[in-house]
Image (cartoon, rainbow, N blue to C red):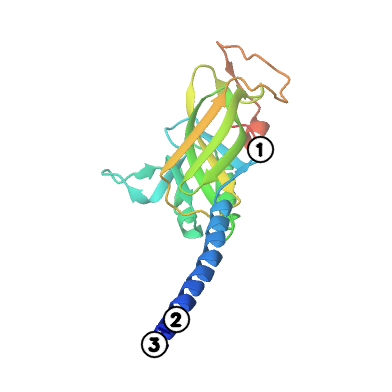
Amino acid sequence: MSPTRRALLSSATLGAVGALAGCLGGADEPESESVQRRASGTDTDPTVLKVRNPDGDAVLVDGAETDGAGDPLSIGRELVTSADRAASLLVAGGVADADRRRVRSFLDETNFDAETVYVARAGVYSCQRLHIDSVSWQPQRVEYEYCRELRPPDEACEAGTRVALALIFRLPVVLDGRLSGSGSSGMSPCQTTATDYAVIDGNATVPGNETAIDEGGDAA
């Protein structure tokens, strides 16, 4: 028996819908994979600001949130995705004025249409500094690799004393502001370094060089 006209029309309609669905799926999947690739990556020469606070437990505090006593909450780790949020980040008391200016300039110069700032809190001994080897990111997660080395002998430090350190990364990608995980791995001392010194007297306080301190740079 030959198929009816209604059966033929029904078959043709289902075939057209199936073909359209196939086209839509094929176009959508590569774009999703492309977005995923753009949201994941590694920078082996990261743009990062290292700022320490020798007189406090935090470097950055939240100007929009306070604790029960009305004091700004300290910021541990966060993805900063807008200029408005960056403007609400404040530098804690005890941070040098030069570093305050560096933080503000760093945040103000970030293009949040193409970049994301990642803030992480770390601890370090006063006479040590961190060298950041790389930073990696994926949706809702950021990790970095580092090594420790001695600070230059002309930088003021106090042996055996720990200080608060903030790492402020500028990532070349737009990320969602949600942060579900983070991590870091490192070694001490650095295996390769440009420093030409190896020891600071462990029982002494190094007075430092005022000009070098005021200039900031990679002293953190």
Task: Identify the residue shown where x is 33% and y is 44%.
Answer: 71
Q: Residues within 10 Å of mark 1 (few under 14, many from 20)?
A: few
In-image side of 128 versus 66 (left or right): right
Rounded to the nearest angstrom, the CA distance separating label 1 from label 3 is 83 Å
Element under label 2? helix
Q: Looking at the image, is 39 positioned above or below residue 8?
A: above
Residue denoted by label 2: 13
- Disc 3 packing (10 Å; few <14; some 14–19; many ≥20): few
Q: Residue at x 62, y 23 (%)?
A: 149
Q: Which residue is mark 1?
A: 215
Between disc 2 and disc 1, the foreground one is: 2
User: Three-letter amino acid code at disc 3?
Assistant: Arg
Residue positioned 49% across, 78% down in the render: 16
Q: Secondary structure at mark 3?
A: helix
| Gap in angstroms between the C-alphas marked 2 and 1 | 73 Å
Q: Nearer the viewer, mark 1 or mark 3?
A: 3
